[in-house]
Image: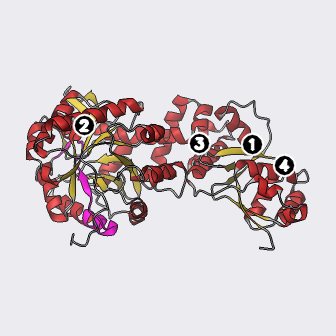
Amino acid sequence: MFDELQEPGCVLPKSPGVGFKHVHFNEILNDCGRVAWLEIHAENYMSEGGRNIAQLKKLRQHFPISCHGVGLSIGGTNPLDKTHLRRLKTLVDWLVPASFSEHLAWSSHDGQYYNDLLPVPYTRAALDRVCDHIDEVQEFLGRSLLLENPSTYLVFEESEMSEIEFISQISKRTGCGLLLDVNNVFVSATNHETDPYSYINEFPLALVGEIHLGGHAEDTDDEGATLLIDNHGAEIVEPVWALFEHTIKLSGALPTLIEWDNDVPEWKTLAAEAQRAHTAMEKFAAFA
Amino acid sequence: MTVCHRDFASALLDSRKPVPAGLTFRSEKANKRFAVYRNNVAVSLTDALQSLFPVVRKLVGDEFFKAMAGVYLRRHPPASPLLAEFGIHMPAFLGGFEPVARLPYLPDVAKLEILIRESFHSKDSVPISNAYLASLEPAELLRARLGIAPSARLLRSRYPAFGIWHANAAGGSQPKNRPENVLVARREFDPKPWHLPGGAYEFIDSLAKGSCISEAADQAAAMQSEFRLDQALAILLKSGAAIEIKSQFD
């Protein structure tokens, strides 16, 4: 069926990108440094007009845009919200983004939206449901999507397979690509006391169309064990940079996003993180 | 044990409910782990309300607003992933929220902040130029029809909604105790509220329904004897609320 899907006019360059924040608009246009592309949250650009839309129309003339959805609730047990899907199609149709991605998570149930990426059990029933939803999204938008691995804090007793097996099955059945969030890998592995390097080694890297790097917060659980919380509100920590370097040694250079959504820093701080990702790709991904 | 999304979702917003069975980590004590989700939901939605209602927040104080946002987001959780639509029930909520009964103007201030956000996200349009309007002969001007921008909003208040907003958002002087009507409009991207003098609300409302300037002015004057056409036109032009112009000879 994917022969019928239209591939976008351009793809994301295998270089660093950043999540676009309105406060950085002028600096990005004046001196973008190593930033070769921008990512936007789809839900912030679904209005009829105003500054957000005007800025995006300007930016798309200068940068490939990655359109990252946070509200489709692909992992939900309810049918997809058709109104929201239509809003998304309207945006994707005029923006013609280089990439569209969404999360392996749910965020809505029974007509209420929870504004968080809630976890999915890795069962055969959930796999069927997620695949149906992805088929529906890809068919409706007329393009394939990249699906992002989640940060998780809990384990479902009912899970029947590993996260990697679950995600690989989804890609195999729907043809979707993958978005590998290296910070999420580190957060989840720490929280579940597993090895993040084994996760990367087992991950189907050939299917990865984009990498995310971001910051997290540190806390402890009821028993005093380390609990990392994905918050996109801080610098990328050294162990996550190391895991990224390990990843690109295996995968080669990939479009790599610096994600910083809360407590947004000055442009030069964000640009420095992009520079570091660029340097790492030059150093570690040269022969892959 | 299967965890159903209904149980998961209801435990997210009600911390008295236990963590759904079937979610574990090594032990039964998964409270702090589940609390990450509870916290993400409450904090992100509270943040959204704080940025939407800065003046309401200033009027009731940060701590009180945070606690009140907690009540609001549980009573009226967002119905869609468009957070630009979240908070629309705040005026009615405030009107019935006993702890703020002493501040009867609060619902109108909340309504004004919602109109500012609506204006921000609405369709763009080009304001008519002062020069064009000035070029019209008086008789032509009276027969002219003005369009009202899709980003313009009107508010009728029994309280000094504009004065309270202005004193708190822009450091204006103490509001006078009087009913105030308000126009929200933007020339480019930043919406701004304008206090409407007597009859101007009715004038703009009439123009929006298709009346020509003289008809709209007559209607406004009939309802509000203090109506002054020059004042009302000046606000329409400065605010960016007036768009294309059509004369009856078009």
Q: Chain of mark 3?
A: B
Tell me the amino acid under the disc marked 3: Phe
* Disc 2 target residue: A278
Q: Residue at x 57, y 47 (%)?
A: B90
Q: Residue at x 60, y 32 (%)?
A: B58
* Disc 3 target residue: B97
Image position, residue A252 (x, y; %): 14, 45
**Mark 4 or mark 3, earlier in chain:** 3
* Disc 1 target residue: B159
Q: Quadrant of the C terminus of chain B?
A: bottom right
Question: How dense is the environment of label 4, judged by Cα within 10 Å: few (below 14), some, or many (20 and up)?
Answer: few
**Mark 1 or mark 3, earlier in chain:** 3
Q: CA distance from mark 2 to mark 1?
A: 57 Å
Question: How dense is the environment of label 1, judged by Cα within 10 Å: few (below 14), some, or many (20 and up)?
Answer: many
Q: CA distance from mark 2 to mark 3?
A: 53 Å
**Is residue A119 left or right of B241 when viewed as pictured?**
left
